[in-house]
Amino acid sequence: MPASAETTPIVPDGFTRRAALQIGVGMFGLDLFRLLEAQAAGGGTRSDISCVFIFLAGGASHFETFDPKPEAPPEIRGIWNPTATNVPGTFICEKMPLMAQRMDKVSIIRSWRGKSGSHSTGSQHVASGFYPPPAGQHFPNFGCLIAALEGNRVPGMPAHFGLPVAARYTKPQGYLGPAYDAFNVKGDPSSPEIDFGSANEASLRFEDRRSMLTQLDDLCRIGDLAGDSLAAHEKFSGEAIELLTSGAMQRAMNLDEESPETRARYGNSINGNRVLLARRLIEAGARFVTINHAVQGGLFGAGATNGTWDNHHLLFDSMLSFEHEPAHIPGSYKWHSTPGPGNLPQLDLSLSALLDDLDDRGMLDSTLIVVMGEFGRTPRINKDAGRDHYPSAGSVLMAGAGVARGAVIGATDRSGVAPITRPWTPEDFATSIYHALGIEAHSTHFPRLTRPTPIADGQVIEGLFA
């Protein structure tokens, strides 16, 4: 059907074909042509499965989410009780009542085990499936690799988004380089700001479409550059321009199209808006959306969009609300008050709404949801009423894309210290994520490496898929 005026890419006057070929290396440091060439060269059948990866930055406590331990001593079990769910015999934390009524849509893996108690190393391990070498992260995060392997599903809609970043503490693109970095939507999604990757020195307010076109027009004035390598890329120029000038992203990011009732179900907050935006981006054709989930308040909430699940102090206050300053703040820490609920109720609101929306729209079977942090938290509550880093045990939620509904996989001991069933590692989760996305991890190799290297070397988690 003919393109409408709203969807036809606008190209500035004087924008020559040769100048268009410079976009890849001239705008925001993105080598779009390599991305498009990789997409064309990949061939084969591309997956129709998308993924929303909710990264609980800082490390969420398994005790206060999906693996409560009511029979443990008080210094381990904490102050909250388990609650029954709509899956007989399955209990989760009482502070997640909405998710308790949706456990028949998800699987919980309770025998997760990591390797590092470092935020950076643990996050890089979890987000890529490979333990990073001493020199730093080498292998890319899942979304960046998906973008490299499969390219864009819809012209004008990038394959991979980070909200607000593609997993904190990581170098998402790894060795792939800035062309495969995520398109980061920073700030509050109600007023989106796009960051085109780590090589970019400036962000772009994406509602200002003309600003972007002005930057494109400025490139034309640089002049034509000779070279056979540019001519070899010529057929990709039109698609690259469309990627940069299409209205698809602006339309997907217009949360005003959602009803006030829907916004309220997601929590009507920065994090609620991010989860709602993730649904809209997937619906518009994005392949992978990583949400760095952290509420803006508490001891680590300085700044408009900061926050963390890293609850070394005042865990039971911080997880519920940051609105009122608690007594006995330790040391020189400052409490950053912010209205609304804390991490746990916001996760309960936004995740339950996302599951309902995807199910109601017939999208849950084609969208994988992963909810995990870089590690769990220590069994024993510390002197500051918090829990510390603990890679030896944790819980992960997965749903959609063939994941079994209502399953609980694995178990930890009575005190949540260690798995008593087979532990499942970040390598196994990577393999399982790729499996859900229709990619055979052991026979699919990383692009741009001289030696064929499988994209994951774990096993598909037993019992995870129906």
Image (tube, helix red, strand yellow):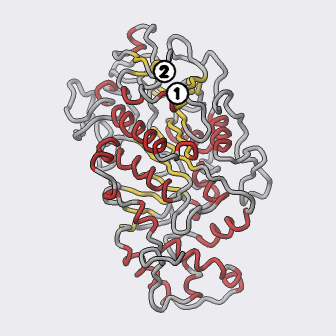
Q: Name the image quarter holding the N terminus.
A: bottom right
- Residue 3 location (% of width, % of height): 50, 77
Residue at mark 1: 395
Which labelled disc corresponds to residue 71? none
Of 104 and 112, which appears nearest the observer? 104
The image quadrant that residue 335 belongs to is top left
Position of residue 208 relative to residue 254, above or below, is: below
The reply to whether residue 20 is in sight is: yes
Tell whether label 2 touches label 1 (CB within 8 Å): yes
First along the sequence among labels 1 and 2: 2
The image quadrant that residue 44 belongs to is bottom right
Q: Element under label 2?
A: loop
Position of residue 435 relative to residue 258, above or below, is: above
The reply to whether residue 392 is in sight is: no
Residue found at x 38% / y 74%: 209
- The residue under label 1 is which amino acid type? Ser
Residue at mark 2: 67
- The residue under label 2 is which amino acid type? Asp
Residue found at x 21% / y 35%: 323
- Residue 136 location (% of width, % of height): 60, 47
Q: Is residue 2 left or right of residue 328?
A: right
Q: Is residue 167 left or right of residue 93?
A: right
Q: Name the image quarter holding the C terminus.
A: top right
Q: Is residue 7 left or right of residue 385?
A: right
